[in-house]
Image (cartoon, coloured by chain):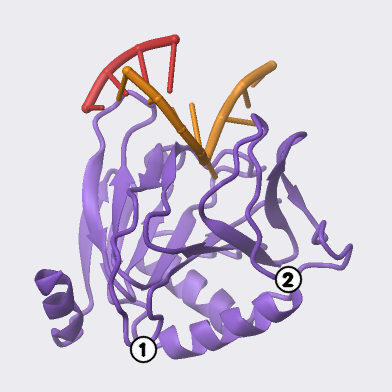
Chain colours: A purple, B orange, C red
Amino acid sequence: MTFDLFDDLLPETPHTEPLAAGAVILRAFAHAAAPALLEAVARITASAPWRHLVTPGGQRMSVAMTNCGSFGWVSDARGYRYEPADPLSGQPWPAMPEPFRTLAAEAAQAAGFAGFAPDACLVNRYLPGTRLSLHQDRDERDLRAPIVSVSLGLPATFLFGGLQRTDRTARVRLAHGDVVVWGGPSRLAYHGVAPLADGDHPLCGHERINLTFRRAR
DNA sequence: TAGTGTCA
DNA sequence: TAGA
């Protein structure tokens, strides 16, 4: 707790940390854009509210989710897939805000993936105790495009493994403004988020917000 | 095909 | 942490 607070008060010094082949952490890359990103999240959830998806096996996910962009990731008894409309309203997902698109493209570029044009952004809300167990992002059509993941609010422990579930996982602390990009040889790496520790973030209170940008089609 | 959950 |  003391260390988390200290981390958040340090001057922002953007830099890149290698995570694995094809995977990097861009520390504080989104720090300056964060207030605008959070305002946009509030507008998104006003029309496409947070909801807890259910896995095909019938388990309720602890992380609350919504989407913006041309396609949104959903899970229900029928499986995982991308949908052009919000099943709750039948309306298209909210458009991807320009600051989202720009940040994702710039982060991908900085990580060595030029020309990233996301058409889907999964927006995740973590409250204390919530987690996302180890999984692969493999519902996308074109696996040449990377995944860009933006952390806002409370810090989290990100788990990043290999191409098999049983591969050893690295545990890395992700703070407000950090961006992780993985693609190429890491595109199908298993990853997840450890149960969120409670805390109080100046902009987000007891929440962590994660934006995951993908090229779904 | 199951499945980003849960238990041991 | 690994395995079902």
Q: Earlier in the sequence, mark 1 or mark 2?
A: 1
Q: Residue at x 20, y 84 (%)?
A: A12
Quarter of the image for residue B1 reads: top right
**Near-viewer residue (C3 or A206):** A206
Which residue is tagged 1? A32
Whether residue A121 is visible to the viewer of this picture, yes or no, is no
Choose mark 1 or mark 2, whichever is in front. 2
Whether residue A217 is visible to the viewer of this picture, yes or no, is yes
Label tally: 2
Tell me residue A10's x, y (percent).
13, 84
Q: Residue at x 46, y 60 (%)?
A: A148
Above or below, comparing residue A20 to residue A127 in the picture: above
Q: Residue at x 83, y 67 (%)?
A: A92
Query: Residues under labels 1 and 2: Cα distance?
Result: 25 Å
Above or below, comparing residue A163 to residue A138 in the picture: above
Q: Amino acid at mark 1?
A: Ala
Residue A48 badge = 2
The quarter in which the N terminus of chain A is drawn is bottom left
Disc 1, SS: loop
Q: Amino acid at mark 2?
A: Ala
User: From the viewer's perspective, is A43 left or right of A184?
Assistant: right
Quarter of the image for residue A18 reads: bottom left
Q: Residue at x 51, y 83 (%)?
A: A37
Quarter of the image for residue A208 reads: bottom left
